[in-house]
Image (spheres, coloured by chain):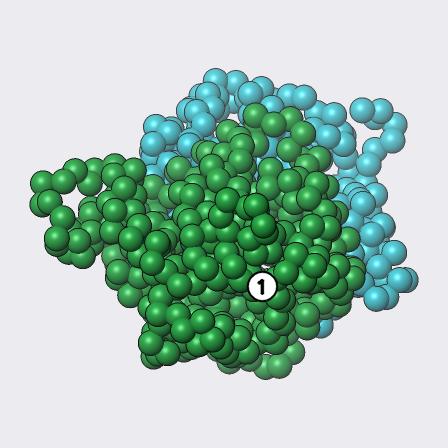
Amino acid sequence: MSVHANPTSPHFKDNAHKALGDPQLQQAMGKLRIGFTAARAASAARLPEFEALRDSARDIKNHTLANLDLYLEAYEKKVVEAGGHVHYARDAAEARKIILDICKEKGAKTVAKGKSMISEEIALNEALDAAGVRPIETDLGEYIIQLRGEIPSHIIGPAVHLTKDQIEAEFRKAHTHLDKDRNLEEPTSLLAEARGVLREKFLSADIGLTGANFLIAETGSSVIVTNEGNGDLSQTLAKTHIVIASLEKIVPTLEDASQLLRVLARSATGQELSVYTTFSTGPRRDGDPDGPQDYHVVLLDNGRTSMIGTEFQEMLRCIRCGACMNHCPVYHAVGGHAYGWVYPGPMGAVLTPSLIGVEKGGLLPNASTFCGRCEAVCPMRIPLPKMMRHWREREFERHLTPSVQRAGLGAWAFFARRPALYRLATRIGMGALGFMGRNKGRFSKLPFASGWTQMRDFPAPEGETFQAQWKRERGGR
Amino acid sequence: MDPSSSKRVGLFATCLVDLFRPSVGFAAVKLLEDAGCTVSVPSQTCCGQPAFNSGDQADARALALQVMDSFANCDYVVAPSGSCAGMMAKHYPELFEGDPELQRRARAFAAKTFELVSFLTDVLGVTQVRASFPRTVTYHDSCSGLRELGVQAQPRKLLASVDGLELKEMKDSDVCCGFGGTFAAKFGEISGAIVERKTVDIIGSGAPVLLAGDLGCLMNMAGRLSRQGRAIEVRHVAEVLANMTDTPPIGAPAEKSAEKTA
Ligand code: SF4
């Protein structure tokens, strides 16, 4: 069974262990760590009003979420006026069914897809395959991981976990009918190669399916940004265009969307704007040079409306820029696949338990040092660490916290809440530990701290506690 | 500052300093007294952060109340740690959401709570220290101090006044060392990989001395450096600022002096 249907998030530690031992992944992550952070920093620095822009981006989404039903209604009205259809899907199964029904109705054999994380969330490709419809990924990264039978490891760069050599090898394996001497050194030549193979499939695809970065209530448009232009091709060439988006992608106005687009590109890749920003509004009208004959929007809930009104509501501001993972030391260390489901990194650590349940996703919000860098760069000012902590609270309340950890914490809290006992116990304990560690100044093994000493020494205490010395020297003032 | 209005500062040593490195506590006392404060050390255990970050709200609240009671008579509460100061100054009020009376108390407590070095510079107006440390050092910005409390320029400013000291910045000094409190124990392997990465930048700076303002991070980095067999001396920034560097560095044997290990 695939990761989509059977998340490996409960095995995060095993996944991480494998990732840490994978030299190619480590090489790829090293590149991401340096490249993305530098690009975002430079682009934020170039725009003096960036911080103000973040505030207004946050406010736009807060306002939208507070009036979500109103804006969804307005959006739907506009799409219908333009001749399109809007479908609401409560969960992944409903969304898949709606899309498969459209495929069936159209007798579709192939679906050309732009990049869409929602399509990953609902495991659409597998459903299409099972129904005899071929999904064709037109985004370069998506295409590569499709060749490899993987899921994206990053929300904007699906194949960032791969090195250039791995990608080149994948292409040579898949495109055997092409010239063996072709140069695949540059990303652009890889893109050209992929296009060469894909273009005919684009042209013959029965249905074009894209995600959406924003849905604009004022105009009924969906907006998609790409750096490859594949969004345009997937949606304008086919007879039927399906937009699949989660319902919090809605924004009130075109002006709002353009504000969010500015923070999105800067936060994601450090660009001023992405290379292609494509708007689509309903099917082709008389006189339009191109465009689909049929236009469908599938709006996915999948647990999102139940986040509204909870401590996780702010997560729905997320515009999927990826900055939080680009700046996350844990993500850098283990890559996106370790998170075990569709959304990795800090945003995934908050979102995954909401979408697949805290029983399965509960380890992810624990896998954070709370360094706060994600919150510091999030263009939407989402308090990611705070929300991860809320998940830990829910786990703790429901006694899902691992028992060893709970027992350790309980023992610590028992003493910490009894200062006299604490002083007595720590005085004895530290005295002993200090004495044992005197010669070396550190321990390379400690029975109760194997998690620590596996990778590093444990510095020995000086011996007498501060409070004991203070009492001796200053009479405990 | 006005010497007639000696400030009553309660030192929250932090549990790590209390248990593992009392010399940091004494360094903090010296810095505060040199700046004219009257320092006391009220009864204390832990600020409650491990409980708070593990989702254990009940214990976190109980410990917060215990700290607030214990330090009730102090004008200021100062901790040689951005992490514990951040817990008290930023998160105590959050802990009492839904209880206006306690939240008001927690806010008042938060308002008088500071991280040591920024307290010296920002509240007491200290611009220089009397200390000598003729070594090249590099400085790691611990996350909570940096991002919750804005501690970044302050330690560098005071270090610049230390006789003979040269600061050589490492690359990405503001990137996490992988400690993360209980994270280092719960996810030891990942934490170890992050600190391994961190040591590349520490070593890359070329400085033989590493300083930071949080003992947890320091123990983590010192532990990894010593596992690698590196002779980099690791100290809390307060020790250098207080001119109290006779104690062996973190993780070094008790009998050798600092000079010999370096
Ligand atoms: S949580 Fe913030 S930083 Fe992360 S993807 Fe969403 S908007 Fe971007």
Q: Give percent across and percent down for residue A47.
A: 61, 27
A46 or A177, which lies in front? A177
Label 1 residue near ligand 1, CB within 8 Å: no
Quadrant location of the N terminus of chain B?
top right
Is residue A54 visible in this depiction of the protein? Answer: no
**Residue at left offset 68%, top offset 73%:** A306
Is residue A78 visible in this depiction of the protein? Answer: yes
Q: Is residue A59 left or right of residue A126?
A: right
Q: Name which quarter of the figure residue B50 lies in.
A: bottom right
Residue density around tag 1, few if under 14, some if 14–19, many if 20 or more, within 10 Å: many
Establish if B160 lies above or below B102.
Answer: above
Q: Give percent across and percent down for residue A97.
A: 50, 78
A159 or A125, which lies in front? A125
**Residue at left offset 63%, top offset 36%:** B151
B178 or A274, which lies in front? A274
**Residue at left offset 57%, top offset 28%:** A45
Amino acid on which the number 1 mark rests in the picture: Val
Q: Give percent across and percent down for residue A173.
A: 15, 56
Residue furthest to the left in view is: A180
How many circles with numbers are drawn on the protein? Answer: 1
**Residue tagged 1:** A297
Establish if B101 lies above or below A260.
Answer: below
Q: Give percent across and percent down for residue A439.
A: 34, 52
Q: Is residue A319 left or right of residue A308?
A: left
Q: Which chain is cyan?
A: B
Residue furthest to the front in view is: A286
Chain letter, disc 1 residue:
A
Which secondary structure lies at badge 1? strand
Display colour for chain A:
green
**Residue at left offset 78%, top offset 62%:** A70
Quadrant location of the C terminus of chain B?
top left
